[in-house]
């Protein structure tokens, strides 16, 4: 671990970012350019004291999970993320086999979406990050590990995962999830994380195995969705999707036309927040 280089790098990157780059209000009495230490700490879920010690070159070695959170908070590129890990005494993450680094371009768009649900997914359906309303609608994915991070795995392994869709829409959603996974498998190959997920699902779910054998391949995200919230009931939403150039990540944005019932329910969702999930 090169504490001096790590500290210098963190200070430099923090100083280069503005609150507006992350969708934050600038606030009053901002005496220095860049983000405040407490803002970086809040974005990563660490204490201000812990982050301060890292910037001062006297902190303990951060974990890989903490470094991944720092990379997202500081909007690092893949190369900058790899450098961060190496200066902290860790091997650079595997860009193929490991959990993907969130694309900074998608994060910049997500940062500006405050009044509508939005989330960034990997090509195997892992929620990498979501905004406040995305978490209120879909639940908090941050505690999930392993295959449970994938929407595809949960759909076929956990019956409760289907409750967010009305019963008539579930067959279509199952086919869409498998077709999406087939597209990822075709790009990344059998030895990728997509391949590992496919083999696990074939062993765990006869339904998945049957759908997989259909060889349907498509990046399917329905333009119009009905999602069922536990307190608000069905919410009709339009779905817009932005992909990274290599199709490895997707930003889902869910909106409703103004003054419709779906729009009114999104206003209520903003008030309810994550209360139902916390309880």
Image: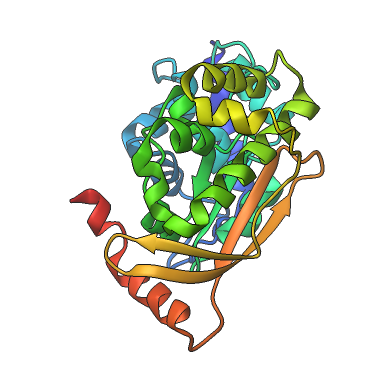
Q: How is colour applied across the structure in the image?
A: rainbow
Q: Position of residue 201 (x, y in %)?
A: 53, 23
**Does residue 234 lie above or below 216 as drawn?**
below
Nearer to me, 222 or 119 = 222
**Does residue 272 lie above or below 199 as drawn?**
below
Q: As drawn, which residue projects farthest toward the bottom?
A: 259
Q: Is residue 265 visible?
A: yes
Count of numbered circles on the image: 0
Q: Residue at x 48, y 85 (%)?
A: 260
Q: Residue at x 26, y 51 (%)?
A: 277
Q: Position of residue 170 (x, y in %)?
A: 50, 51
Nearer to me, 53 or 87 = 87
**Does residue 145 lie above or below 17 as drawn?**
above
**Does residue 208 lie above or below 254 as drawn?**
above
Image side of residue 123 versus residue 140, left or right? right
Nearer to me, 54 or 149 = 149
Q: Residue at x 65, y 29 (%)?
A: 212
Q: Is residue 21 visible?
A: no
Q: Position of residue 276 (x, y in %)?
A: 24, 57
Looking at the rendering, which quadrant does residue 103 occupy?
A: top right
Nearer to me, 220 or 61 = 220
Q: Position of residue 240 (x, y in %)?
A: 66, 63
Q: As drawn, which residue projects farthest toward the left?
A: 279
Image side of residue 97 versus residue 266, left or right? right
Image side of residue 80 versus residue 88, left or right? right
Looking at the rendering, which quadrant does residue 72 occupy?
A: top right
């Amino acid at each position: 671990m090169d504490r001096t280089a790590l500290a210098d790098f963190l200070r430099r990157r923090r100083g280069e970012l503005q609150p507006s780059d992350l969708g934050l209000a600038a606030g009053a009495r901002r005496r220095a350019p860049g983000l405040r230490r407490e803002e970086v700490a809040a974005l990563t879920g660490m204490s201000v004291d812990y982050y301060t010690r890292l910037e001062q070159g006297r902190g303990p070695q951060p974990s890989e999970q903490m470094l991944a959170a720092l990379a997202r908070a500081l909007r690092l590129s893949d190369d900058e993320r790899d450098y961060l890990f190496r200066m902290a005494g860790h091997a650079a993450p595997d860009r193929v086999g490991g959990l993907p680094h969130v694309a900074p371009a998608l994060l910049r768009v997500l940062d500006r979406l405050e009044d509508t649900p939005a989330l960034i997914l990997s090509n195997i359906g892992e929620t990498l990050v979501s905004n406040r309303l995305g978490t209120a609608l879909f639940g908090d994915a941050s505690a999930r590990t392993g295959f449970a991070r994938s929407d595809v795995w949960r759909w076929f392994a956990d019956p409760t995962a289907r409750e967010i869709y009305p019963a008539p829409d579930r067959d279509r959603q199952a086919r869409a999830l498998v077709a999406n996974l087939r597209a990822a498998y075709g790009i990344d190959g059998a030895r990728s994380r997509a391949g590992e997920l496919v083999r696990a699902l074939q062993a765990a779910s006869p339904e998945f195995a049957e759908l997989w054998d259909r060889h349907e391949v498509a990046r399917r995200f329905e333009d119009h969705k009905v999602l069922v919230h536990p307190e608000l009931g069905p919410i009709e939403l339009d779905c817009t999707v932005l992909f990274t150039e290599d199709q490895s990540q997707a930003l889902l944005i869910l909106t409703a036309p103004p003054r419709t019932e779906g729009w009114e329910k999104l206003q209520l969702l903003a008030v309810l927040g994550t209360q139902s999930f916390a309880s």
